Image: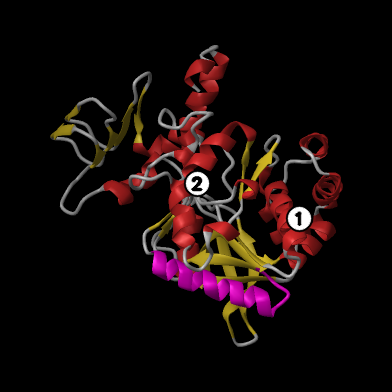
Amino acid sequence: MAGGSGTRFWPRSRQRVPKQLLAITGRRPLLTDTVERLRPLVSPARTWVVTAAVHAAAVRRAVPKVPRRNVLVEPEGRNTAAAIALAALRLGADAPDAVMAVLPADHAISDGAAFRATLAQALDVAAKTDTLVTLGVEPTHPETGYGYIELGAGVDGLPAHRVARFLEKPSAPRAVELIARGNVLWNAGIFAWRVETILAALREWVPAVLEPLERAVRSGGTRALGRAYRQLPRVSIDTGVLERAQNVAVVHARFPWSDVGSWAAVDALWQKPGEVNAVRGTVVTVDSRGCIVDAGSRLVALLGVEDLVVVDTPDAVLVCPKDRAQDVRLVVDALGAKHLGRYR
C-alpha cells in the first residue's frame, strides 16, 4: 500500500512526494526498500503496489522491477479497505488460490532476514487456516502512537495466537499499564491471508466497499473504476473488518520495526552511538541536545536548544518541539487556509 500524503513529514514530504517516496532511512525511497526487503520470499514480479493517480509515475520509477500492470492506481483515496479490496480482486483474477501479504510501503525494518522469516510464518498460518493474520511487534516502551493487540489462545499448534481484541492508541498511563501486563503487542499493520478469505470478510463486513469494486473490475477500464470509487465509503481495514471479525490471528514479529510515523521517529534511526542529537546533512550543534535535524543542502547550526525538530528544504523550514512532531499536519492544514497551497 503506497497511498497517503505523508503530511507529518512536511516540508520534506509534499502532496506529490509523500513519505513512501522519500529516502528517510537510507539512500532509497521507503517504497523501494519495502519491495526489495521481500526478496527472495516474494519477487518483484509477484508484487503489486496500490497507489494514487498523482503518485503513479513516481511509484513506477521507484520500483522499476515491478511489472507496470502490477501498479494499481486508485482514482482517489478511500482508506485501506478499498486499497486492499482492489488488490485482492486483481490478484484473485490471476491466482484465486493465492496467499496474500499486505504491507505499508513506508515502514522502517532494519533486519530483512528476520522480517522475511516472520512473514513466511504468517503466510504459512494464513495458508493452513481460515484466518486473517496480522503481525504484532514486541513493545519496547509505553508508546501512545501505536494500536495494541491483546493475545488470546494459541492457534492449532501454529506459531500464532488468536486476537483477543484490538486496543486503540492509549493514553500514556494506559500504555504503561498495557506494557506492565505483558500480554500485548504493537499492531504493525502488516497482514497475511488467503485471497478468498479476505474477499469473504470484506463481503461480510464492508459490502459497500467490495461490491462496487467487483463490478468495476469485471467491467474493466478506468472510467468504471472512477465511478466505483466515488461511491465508496472511507473505511480502514482495521475498523471495517479486523476489529469485527472473529477469525483473526497474530504472529509475533521478531524484527526491529518502526512505522516512521513522524519526524520524532527518526531519532532512533539517525542517532549515532555516543551522539546526543540525530542529524542528517551538515549540522553544527553547540550546547544542544535531543534535537532532530534534517539539514538538506545547507549548513544548519543549533545553539543552546533542546528537543527540537529542524527541517530545512529549499523553499520551507520547519522548527517545532519534538513532542509536537505528530502535529506537523496542522501546519499543512494552515497552509491551505492561508492560500499557500504551493508549499503543501
Residue at 47% in and 19% down: 343
Can you give x and y, in whole percent of width and height, for residue 74 in the image? 69, 39
Q: How many marks?
A: 2
Q: Residue 101 colored magenta?
A: no
Q: In this picture, is 22 found above or below 273? A: above
Magenta span of residues: 112-132
Tell me the mark number nearer the camera, choosing from 1 and 2: 2
Secondary element type, mark 2: loop
Q: Nearer the viewer, residue 92 or 10?
A: 92
Secondary element type, mark 1: helix
Q: Quadrant of residue 165?
A: bottom right
Q: Residue flagged by tag 1: what amino acid is it?
A: Leu
Q: Is residue 59 left or right of residue 270?
A: right
Q: Quadrant of residue 151?
A: bottom right
Numbered label attached to residue 64: 2
Q: Most prominent secondary structure in the magenta stretch?
A: helix
Can you give x and y, in whole percent of width and height, for residue 238 in the image? 67, 55
User: Does the CB distance between marks 1 and 2 fall below 8 Å?
Assistant: no
Q: Residue flagged by tag 2: what amino acid is it?
A: Pro
Can you give x and y, in whole percent of width and height, for residue 65 in the image? 51, 51
Q: Nearer the viewer, residue 185 or 253?
A: 253
Mark 1, residues whose alpha carbon is within 10 Å: few (<14), some, or many (≥20)? many
Numbered label attached to residue 89: 1
